[in-house]
Amino acid sequence: MARLADFDLDDSSPAVSPHALAAGAAEAITKLAAGLPNLADVTEVLDDDRSDLTAREEQQKDQTETVIRTAHAAGKAAVWVMGQGIAAAAKGKWFRRTHSSLEQYVVDLIPDVVPRQARRWVTGYPIALAITSRTGESPVEGQVREIADLPESVAVELYAAADTAARAAGGRLTAKHLTDLRRSLRDRPLPADPDQAREDLHGRATVLFQPPKVPGPIGPGSFESDSNGVGGRSDADDIEDAEIVEHPQLDSLHRGLIELKAARRHLTKAAFQEATTEGDPERYEELLREINAVLTVLNGRAKRAPQPDAPQG
């Protein structure tokens, strides 16, 4: 079974030609594919079959999933390996006789890569590869972007805590989870002791993946505490000072319409097109799904909205 380490090159090894490198990569991929069960040995099952898997099917399933996960991990880690390589090229200026800039050199070296993508790989590779080494899972660009400016040790611990919590909850770690976990550090710093800090961080990460609590009914205690406000104000005082709203739901709909019009300025055709070139397809697909989900809900509500009652003559 090929591993990520199979793609490593020893610094002491002699120079390798591009063709040899390509052949080596192809060989590693071939070895990885060889770990899959032979398709001819896989029993075809009808779509409506809900029977238990046989022992042989369980073995084939585990074998296949291992190969798929390894291939996926290798693909995600590859961009950070390229980032480290580009950083080395930038430091040594190995292109100085052939290209006037690093950007031109990278475009010729990897024609399908957008320069700003390459810059993100260069800045993010130390943390990304450290995370890969620690967790066995390579982060995507959007995740690294959220923690790239943190000290490496903090960034790795933060990602590891969030990744562990996500797996334990059966969820999927996203860049937003990392953003939320990082934001909690501003509100309440970690303990100075490393072990306590690690435990605290894992506790915070676990909270991120807990389902939201359903609020219970409002009891008498809530009203009593509300009435004992600053300066001994009573409920009557609050009622006298409150603004009388004659059409609260119409006003709410109006505010929603204003917010939708504001969102329309961001959700443009150009914005979607540019987003596809920014090197984070996972984040783009996630945002696109959520946007479509919100639009579907709002469209359904508007279509099912009741019509006003006819005026009485």
Image: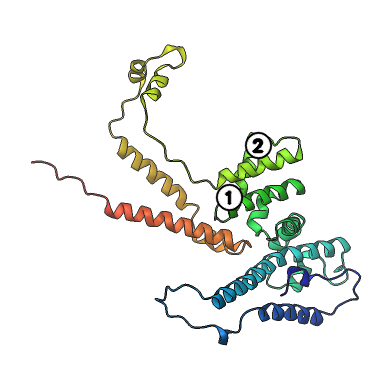
Are there few (<14), some (14-19), or many (20+) residues within 10 Å of tag 1?
Answer: few
Q: Which residue is mark 1?
A: 176
In this rendering, position of residue 32 left or right of residue 300 = right
* In front of the other: 104 or 178: 178
In this rendering, position of residue 193 left or right of residue 67 = right
Residue 19 image point, x, y percent: 80, 82
CA separation, marks 1 and 2?
Answer: 16 Å
- At horizontal 36% and vertical 24% (from top left) the residue drawn is 220
Q: Which mark is residue 262?
A: none
- At horizontal 74% and vertical 41% (from top left) the residue drawn is 195
Residue 144 image point, x, y percent: 68, 54
- At horizontal 42% and vertical 49% (from top left) the residue drawn is 261
Residue 155 image point, x, y percent: 71, 48
Q: Which residue is mark 2?
A: 186
- At horizontal 59% and vertical 55% (from top left) the residue drawn is 167
- Image quadrant occupied by the C terminus: top left
* In front of the other: 22 or 105: 22
Judge whether 23 appears above or below 264 on screen.
below
Can you see residue 135? yes
Q: Secondary structure at mark 1?
A: helix
- Dots 1, 2 in contact, CB < 8 A: no
Judge whether 85 appears above or below 313 on screen.
below
Q: Amino acid at mark 1?
A: Lys
> N-terminal of the two: label 1 or label 2?
1
The part of the image, by quadrant, that contains residue 86 is bottom right
Q: Amino acid at mark 2?
A: Arg
The part of the image, by quadrant, that contains residue 39 is bottom right
In this rendering, position of residue 228 left or right of residue 137 = left
In this rendering, position of residue 13 left or right of residue 189 = right
Residue 140 image point, x, y percent: 65, 60
The part of the image, by quadrant, that contains residue 135 is bottom right
